[in-house]
Image: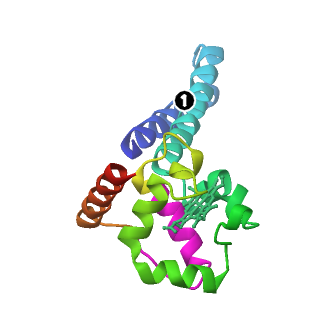
Amino acid sequence: MGKEIFSTMTRGILLLKKWAYSRVGNIHFNLGSMQIKFIMCFMLAIAFSKFTAAVEESPSGEKIYKEVCFACHAQGVANAPKLGDKAAWGKLIAEGQVIITAHGYVGIRAMPPRGGKEGLSVEQFSKALNYMVSKSGGQWGPPDKDMIEEINKEITRRKNTQ
Ligand code: HEC
């Protein structure tokens, strides 16, 4: 992608040079279409850079929290552990990342599965959870491949006993 933007920009610059030359040299060029091409190249380059920015930027934990978890965890609806409540979160943190991520994901008592967001992946759920943990006295990193496997095992085990 980076290379494509670069080459589009280079083409735009070359066209600009040609256009400038055509003016100085007073050579008969179709200026109108040259200008349009240049403008189009520029717009394409901008569109490409916007596109790559959108692809690289998967939603952050904070964003998912605000979209999904905030509704209950900001105010502590139905006894949901409140964001920033170190006592409530301290107990959960002590149980460990694998267990708490899996149980939250499957749903527990008044906590709906995935916080009610059907398509949320384990990774996305974990990001939102880790954001809450980071604001509530803990620090959990993104789960690596092995931990994801452990979480998935616990999810299956939990589903079978529910
Ligand atoms: C509809 C309200 C609601 C939403 C939305 C919600 N939660 Fe919860 N959550 C709860 C409630 C209520 C509890 C407390 C459950 C209990 O212990 O009885 C809870 C508990 C939890 C727990 C503790 C689980 C355990 O093992 O005790 C985690 C982790 C959690 N939520 C994560 C999340 C995340 C992450 C999101 C967003 C992706 C989210 N929740 C969205 C209501 C919600």
Q: Is residue 52 left or right of residue 159?
A: right
Q: Residue at x 52, y 47 (%)?
A: 53
Quadrant of the frame with the N terminus: top left
Q: Which residue is mark 1?
A: 41
Give yes or no for residue 32 being in the magenta stretch.
no
From this viewpoint, which residue is outermost toward the front?
Answer: 161
Residue drawn at (73%, 62%) of the image: 77
Q: Residue furthest right?
A: 75
Can you tell me whether the CB of the residue at mark 1 lies under 8 Å from the nearest atom of ligand 1?
Answer: no
Residue span colored magenta: 124-141
Quarter of the rendering containing residue 97: bottom left
Query: Percent position (x, y) of residue 74?
Result: 73, 66
160 or 116: nearer the viewer? 160
* Residue in view at x 56 percent, y 42 percent: 50
Q: Estimate how packed mark 1 is, as few (under 14), some (14 to 19) or many (20 or more) residues with alpha carbons within 10 Å.
A: many
Quarter of the figure with residue 65: bottom right
Task: Name the side, left or right, on which 155 lies relative to 34.
Answer: left
Q: Is residue 102 above or below residue 134?
A: above
